Image (cartoon, helix red, strand yellow):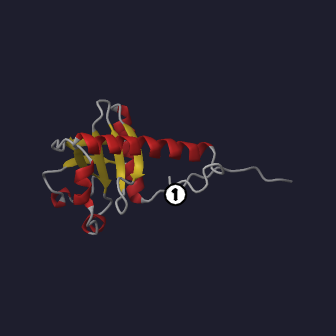
């Protein structure tokens, strides 16, 4: 007798749980979202969000004080977005986070923008390059979901 296939959802790391809630919330606001987006070699943002007016937001998800303290790259992400946010859960010590950045409170099911990040608009050439990269990345990732064998070697 052949045993039936049983779906077992992937186990998410704490930061990925926060990212899921952030993505759900931003999608409800009309944003398209991509997790683990690479704007440039050596950088990987937790969530890149493309808004309905073409705005680009970066959201870094921090699950603990240690996770935040070990992140030495976040300031490098500022030049790849119009607004930068931290996403944390209700237990996170938010006083650690710079006040000149946005703040999102999240869990695995949703999120709420608590403090809107100041806007620092991207230059046109950089925005154009990032929009093309965002579209390419999202399309390749979708292809990989639809046809994992056909997308072999795709960096998604």
Query: Is residue 112 visible in this depiction of the protein?
Result: no
Q: Nearer the viewer, residue 115 or 133?
A: 133
| x and y, in percent, of residue 118 in the image | 15, 43
Residue shown at 24%/49% (left/top)? 85
Q: Quadrant of the N terminus?
A: bottom right
Instruction: Say if 14 sits above or below 133 in the image.
Output: below
In the picture as drawn, the residue positioned furthest to the front comes out as 125
- Residue tagged 1: 11
Q: Is residue 83 left or right of residue 22?
A: left
In the picture as drawn, the residue positioned furthest to the right comes out as 1
Instruction: Say if 82 sits above or below 71 in the image.
Output: above
Q: Label 1: few (<14), some or many (≥20) within 10 Å?
A: few
| x and y, in percent, of residue 137 in the image | 46, 46
Residue shown at 76%/50% (left/top)? 4
Secondary element at image label 1: loop
Q: Is residue 49 left or right of residue 83?
A: right
């Amino acid at each position: 007798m052949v045993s039936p296939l049983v779906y077992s959802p992937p186990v998410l790391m704490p930061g990925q749980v926060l990212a899921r809630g952030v993505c759900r919330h931003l999608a409800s606001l009309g944003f398209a979202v991509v997790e683990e987006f690479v704007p440039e070699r050596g950088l990987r943002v937790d969530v890149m969000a493309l808004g309905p007016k073409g705005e680009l937001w970066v959201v870094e998800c921090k699950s603990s004080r240690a996770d935040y303290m070990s992140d030495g790259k976040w300031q490098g992400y500022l030049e790849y977005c119009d607004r930068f946010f931290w996403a944390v859960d209700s237990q996170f010590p938010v006083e650690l986070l710079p006040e000149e950045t946005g703040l999102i409170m999240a869990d695995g099911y949703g999120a709420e923008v608590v403090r809107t990040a100041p806007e620092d608009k991207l230059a046109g050439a950089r925005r154009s390059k990032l929009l093309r990269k965002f579209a390419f990345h999202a399309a390749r990732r979708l292809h990989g979901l639809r046809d994992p064998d056909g997308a072999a070697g795709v960096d998604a």
